[in-house]
């Protein structure tokens, strides 16, 4: 099965791309989060400025122009069509590591009130810094993540008070 992605650029332009097309790109990593891409004999310098893995949102710079990307796959489309899209009332009681990585920074303390989208911690994975944000307003109950430690995928990092 070929995976399809719907990419929204700056909330104004939308296009479809396949996983095969992404894999066939002539791109070379030239630094941490920096790439050189050759497409139709045209060079592009790309830098990933910010990434939110959980929300599939990225801010990139292409030849000194900045773009905000929202990327959805076939599963996201199906979930939305079935009416199961996440509502504003999220019932997440803990934050788990979405992938193995290194805890670079912890931005909250136990007992702290946080708002939805507040940055909780930074997880470095595959040479990219991923800002893990709060899925809802709440109070931090416990923090099991330790700055400088590595974590496995699925490890509980932060728990919210009920």
Image (cartoon, rainbow, N blue to C red):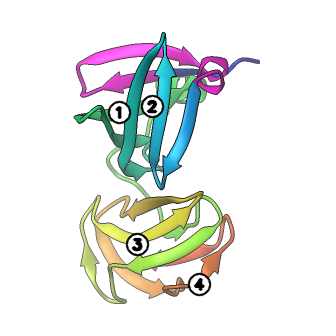
Circle 1 residue? 69
Residue situated in front as seen by the camera: 36 or 75: 36
Q: Relative to residue 34, is residue 137 depicted above or below?
A: below
Q: Is the residue 106 above or below the residue 24 in the image?
A: below
Q: Which residues are magenta?
A: 6-25
Pick whichever of labels 4 and 2 is earlier in the sequence. Answer: 2
Residue identifier under label 4 = 149
- Cα distance, mark 4 to mark 3? 12 Å
Residue 22 sits inside the magenta stretch? yes
Q: Earlier in the sequence, mark 4 or mark 1?
A: 1
Residue highlighted by disc 2 = 71
| Labelled pair 2, 3 in contact (Cβ < 8 Å) | no
Image check: 28 left or right of 62? right
Q: CA distance from mark 2 to mark 1?
A: 6 Å
- As helix, strand or loop, the secondary structure at mark 4 comes to loop
Q: Is residue 119 visible?
A: yes
Furthest residue in direction right, as rendered: 1
Instruction: Please indicate, yes or no, whether residue 160 appears anywhere in the rendered image.
Output: no
Label 3 element class: strand
**In the image, is residue 67 part of the stretch drawn in magenta?**
no
């Amino acid at each position: 099965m070929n995976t399809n992605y719907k990419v929204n650029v700056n909330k104004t332009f939308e296009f479809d791309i396949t996983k095969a097309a992404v894999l066939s790109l002539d791109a070379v990593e030239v630094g941490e989060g920096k790439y050189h891409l050759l497409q139709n004999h045209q060079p592009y310098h790309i830098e990933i400025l910010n990434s939110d893995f959980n929300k599939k949102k990225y801010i990139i710079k292409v030849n000194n122009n900045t773009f905000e990307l929202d990327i959805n796959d076939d599963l996201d489309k199906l979930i939305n069509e079935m009416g199961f899209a996440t509502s504003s009332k999220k019932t997440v009681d803990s934050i788990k590591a979405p992938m193995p990585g290194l805890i670079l920074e912890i931005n909250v303390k136990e007992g702290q009130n946080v708002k939805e989208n507040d940055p909780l911690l930074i997880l470095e994975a595959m040479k990219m810094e991923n800002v893990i944000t709060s899925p809802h307003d709440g109070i931090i109950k416990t923090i099991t993540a330790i700055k400088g430690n590595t974590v496995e995928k699925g490890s509980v990092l932060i728990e919210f008070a009920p």
